[in-house]
Amino acid sequence: MADDTSIGADKDFVEYVVKSIVGEPEKVIVERTVDDMGVLLTLQVAKEDMGKVIGRSGQTAKSIRILLRVIGSKDNIRVNMKIVEPEGGEIRGGELEEDAKEEKSILDEPELEV
């Protein structure tokens, strides 16, 4: 792994996948931080693209997180992704609320052993 913590295959992967599925790829921001717990990728997208990134019942976000764990397992690094809710995000009919519950349960899952 490189000494510069702002670059990595995990960050490149998230940027590529998310920019491929959103309507406004120029507004995708991925920040990478490393600490004793592992790598945390913080993802920001346009408000209109949140549904595309999270997916139905959180399945798209869950799939990206699973693939990130596989990428991290190559170097024995724990990789997590946090999706930041944009300013002025609305909860319509409990959709984002349900996604937040799904996101929490994804984070509580045990790590995959490859």
Image (cartoon, grey):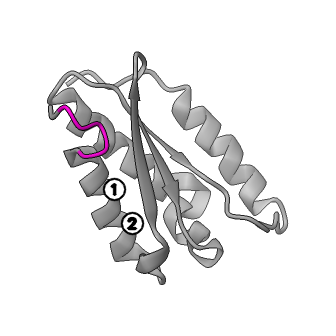
Residue annotated with mark 2: 18
Q: Quadrant of residue 101?
A: top right
What is the crowding at mark 2: few (fewer than 14 residues within 10 Å), some, or many (at least 20)? many
Q: Quadrant of residue 74?
A: top left
Write the residue at 82% across / 69% down. 92
Write the residue at 38% across / 23% down. 111
Number of residue marks: 2
Q: Position of residue 49 (x, y in %)?
A: 56, 74
**The residue positioned farthest toward the front in the image shown:** 4
What is the crowding at mark 1: few (fewer than 14 residues within 10 Å), some, or many (at least 20)? many
Q: Which residues are magenta?
A: 3-7
105 in relation to 83, above or below: above
Q: Classify residue 19 as left or right of residue 56.
A: left
Residue annotated with mark 1: 14
52 in relation to 4, above or below: below
Residue 80 bears which disc, if any? none
What is the spatial separation of the Cα atoms under label 2 and label 1, in whole angstroms?
A: 6 Å
Indicate yes or no whether the magenta region holds residue 4. Answer: yes
Task: Say which quadrant the C terminus sits in.
Answer: top left
Write the residue at 23% across / 38% down. 4
